[in-house]
Amino acid sequence: MDDEGQHQDQVQQLQEQMGGQQWHQQQQRQQCGPGFGSLYTTVCDRIRAENILDTVMEHFQQCHSDQARISYVWQLPEVRELQLKSHTSGKCSEEAQSCEELYDMLVNSENNAARALEVVQRAILKTPADDTNVLARRFMKRAWALLLLEQFDDAFTDASRALHIAKSPGLLWNAHEILAHCHAKMKSYKKAEPHFVKALEGLRKSSASNEEKAAVAGRVSTVFRMVKEENKPKNRAKETNKKQQEMKTKKFNKKKKKEQTKSENSIDEDVIREEENDEEEEAGMEKSRHKLPEVPKISLGKNSKLDCASAAVSVVVIEGRGRCVIANRDIRAGSVVMVDKPYASVVNADQLHQRCNNCCRRCLTSLPCLHCAVVVFCSDECRSSGAAQHRLECSVMTHLYDATLGKMAPLVFRILTAVSWQRLKKSKEKLLSDPLLEDEAPKLIESIMEGNEQQKWRWEGHYSPTDYLTTLYLVTNASKRSFGDHFKRALSAVYISQCLAAAGFFGSNPGADDIKFAATLAVRHLQSCSCNAYEISEMQLKENIAENKSLEIGGAVYPTVSLSNHSCFPNVARYNVGTCCVLRATRLIPRGAEVLDNYGYYFHVIPQVERRDTLRLQYKFECSCEACTGSWPLYPHRQGEPIIFRCPVTECNAHSSFLDGRQMECKSCGDKQLYGKLVKSISTRLDNYSKALSLMHDAKFESALKVLLQHQEFLETQAVYPAKHYTDVQEMLRQCLNCLGNTHCVNPKVNTN
């Protein structure tokens, strides 16, 4: 057998060994209690076998509160016997060692670098926290894989961390080589030199074979000679002169571009200034990968009642629509209407190994949880600040992230643990007797309105996302749910409450009434989250902006954003910066108009019947937005008519298409002067729109947004919708805003999805 075949066999054997270790851990998890899927199936099978479904339905449907429904399922024999045990998906030195051995085989080939990175990540997750030297070595090895993948900033971070935590840093000579390569890549030759020296010194003292020492020394010395040559005074002077010349050329080009743009008089001065700020936007897509963008400031002042909203909005109650967010003054496109913080947030199961459990940031140089082998953090700061919310869930992650339980379960668990049991217990009697928590609460609110069309919102005090009550009182649509929906959610809530008990949420020896009370709250949150929880997303940036896609990375409860209603033709866009949710206007919202979000069902993409059916099923309402009542056509709406505009003559106001031969005279009223001027203006504006797309392609999103917003304001006064170009501009505005939030540059060398 040749060396390559022998190598493949060794890799396969190690993978099989790792699979056996994972199977053993799975057996241990099964001893900690049944998964939710097993519980639910057992209950349903017994009901069918005993032929008592009609009786169960009849009795269960007489329960008109969450408390009554929990009391009913609590009496089921399967629930009475249910007992979950905590189980930390813990560290395992043997599996970590197997992963490291597999890494050592894979990393010899650059083609396997991405797979090697994945394997060493697993090794780090599984390494016990007190094995400091071993962790340091594995951080160093991850840094090497990142170096091979040309992720120089991340490689630098890991190599520095390895040297910092190692009790014997002299053994990690390879970390110095990595740091030297990273400095050399950044042309910091003076800083690279001492690291190459330390790498060669450490290599000589290491226990590596002479053959390995010779090969590595040759590799290091080759780059080291180049660095020393570049670091000579004459070469440093050349590099300095080159940079100065580049700066002069850049300044000259800016000045020339500014003069040309001024003469065209097609874009405002603030846009020109924005384009000139290359120092902030030049990094574009690369910069966004390592650093969260800044959270924008709320426009038009802060609301006196809503802590996370603009003073330009108010909340009212409208019959048939419930709570609504209304503009109390004109809100221009681009205005920041809300910046909401989550009451609770979680990372999706498929993202847990690569996202910070505290801030949701993507991180290739993650720090593992000190106890479990599931969760990671992006920094020591996040690991410290996220410890409180992860402490309880750490021991029941296997139960909570059971796919059959649904992805809302971890979020509901965090909602309850964010309050603390002591505080909940103090409010127990008050919450259980609150009429607004009954199924008939919507009818109660309507009766308070006394038939008036619009009433003042009766929330007392500040409405803050940190206040548990703002999350507790979110709409559940309980009275509109089916038997099957209620029954499964009640069982899910009991399962979650047992997870709380297993994790020690209630303290030692909790009583059944306490667990039932937590289940009562849990079932309410399961209902409200199904129609009030939001995804946390990240825009995947590619070279072709048409291929950019939004990736769901987690979920959160945003109490303030939840006050806004849906429209298939929304006037705001929603995006995330870290775990914060930003709501910005995409078109003019006139005073008295409702602020309208979109729940993922746009009129130009999804047929009307499908939109309405889905919204009715999940969100329990019949959509009566402008697009639905007007039966607006799908994109591109009217074939061959990108822009439909109004005649500028007030008495006429007739509709015309921009492609009607671009005639310079209104077919309806015959006006030439105003009409012809408008047609010329539209032509110029379309050129500016093309400029915005070019800026988007160059990842200059702030500059692109300025141009798009000016173009949108022009369309507000002249265009008729729906029309292809109007929809294009709205879609591009949404994408541009998303690119100002969480983003990731898709790099084919690193498969981090």
Image (cartoon, grey):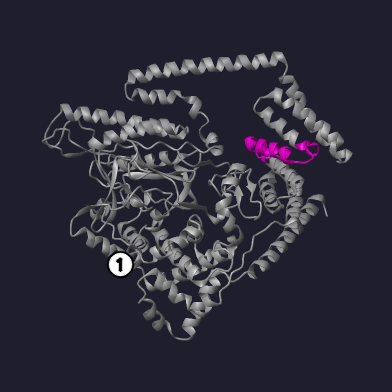
Say which residue appears at 77% left-offset and 51% top-offset. 101
Give the image quarter of residue 151: top right
Q: Residues within 10 Å of mark 1 (few under 14, many from 20)?
A: some
Secondary structure at badge 1 equals loop
Identify the residue at the far right of this view: 210
Q: Is 335 colored magenta in this rendering?
A: no
Q: Which residue is mark 1?
A: 440
Q: Residue furthest front?
A: 426
Residue 170 in percent (x, y) is at 80, 36
Front position in the image: 220 or 470: 470
Q: Is residue 285 above or below residue 43?
A: above
The part of the image, by quadrant, that contains residue 646 is: top left
In front of the other: 666 or 456: 456
- Residue 317 in the figure: left or right of residue 497: left
Question: Does 98 sit left or right of 634 as displayed?
Answer: right
Q: Is 173 in the magenta?
A: yes
Say left or right for 14 vs 372: right
Q: Is residue 351 visible?
A: no
Q: Residue furthest bottom?
A: 50
Figure quadrant of residue 272: top left
Q: Is residue 531 visible?
A: yes
The three-letter amino acid code for the residue at tag 1 is: Glu
In which quadrant of the rendered image does the N terminus lie?
bottom right
SS majority, magenta: helix
In the rendered image of this protein, does residue 208 appear above or below residue 623? above
Give residue 463's position: percent from left, percent from top.
Answer: 36, 48
Q: Is residue 683 above or below residue 97?
A: above
Residue 706 in the image, given as x and y percentages of width and height: 37, 31
Q: Looking at the picture, how far across and down is residue 475, in whole percent?
A: 35, 59
Read off the magenta span.
146-174
In front of the other: 149 or 330: 330
